[in-house]
Structures are given as C-alpha cells and as structure tokens.
C-alpha cells in the first residue's frame, strides 16, 4: 500500500467520536460565515460607489 502525504492522512482520519454530520455542520457554518462576509463587503463597496456617483452628479450640476 502506498504511503499518503501526512496532510492527506490527517484529513482522512475522523476525530474520535465526531460524526460526519457534525463535520458537515461545521463546514456549512464556515461557508455561511465566508459568504456573509463577502456579501457585506460587496454591499459596502456598492454603497461607496453610489456615493461617489452622486457626488459626481452634484459636481456636474454645480458646474452647469
């Protein structure tokens, strides 16, 4: 039998007493957190862009 690299061996070994369901719940929780952070950052960037566009519109109105 071929030897697996240590990182793969560690991933393949299930922690004693930990079910696949709890591992899946942990992964899902982490994914939700990452997606939530990404959405928050995107919303912040969109709000910033909107403020910049409104500022340009006011500047153009002032120059006319």
Image: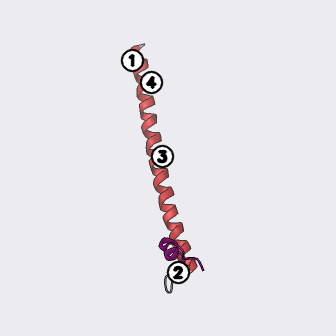
Q: Secondary structure at mark 1?
A: helix
Of label 4 and label 1, which has the lower sequence position? 4
**Nearest the eye: 23 or 14:** 14
Residue at the disc numbered 4: 57
Callout 4 environment at 10 Å: few (<14), some (14 to 19), or many (20+)?
few
Magenta region includes residue 42: no
Residue 4: quarter of image: bottom right
Of label 1 and label 3, which has the lower sequence position? 3
Residue at figure coordinates x 50%, y 67% from the top left = 29
Residue at figure coordinates x 52%, y 72% from the top left = 8
**Nearest the eye: 7 or 21:** 7
Q: Which colour assignment does the render follow?
A: secondary structure
Of label 2 and label 4, which has the lower sequence position? 2
Residue at figure coordinates x 54%, y 76% from the top left = 3
Q: What is the magenta range? A: 1-13
Q: Residue furthest right?
A: 1
Distance (Cα) linking label 2 and label 1: 66 Å
Spot occupied by residue 28 in the image (x, y as percentages of width and height): 54, 67
Q: Which mark is residue 42?
A: 3
Q: Secondary structure at mark 4?
A: helix
Of label 2 and label 3, which has the lower sequence position? 2
Q: Quadrant of the C terminus?
A: top left
Spot occupied by residue 21 in the image (x, y as percentages of width and height): 57, 77
Marks 2 and 4: which is nearer the front?
2
Distance (Cα) linking label 2 and label 3: 36 Å
Q: Which mark is residue 14?
A: 2
Residue at the disc numbered 1: 62
């Amino acid at each position: 039998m071929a030897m697996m690299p240590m990182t793969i061996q560690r991933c393949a070994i299930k922690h004693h007493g930990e079910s696949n369901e709890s591992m899946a719940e942990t992964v899902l929780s982490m994914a939700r957190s990452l997606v939530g952070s990404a959405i928050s950052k995107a919303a912040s960037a969109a709000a910033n862009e909107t403020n910049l566009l409104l500022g340009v519109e006011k500047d153009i109105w002032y120059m006319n």
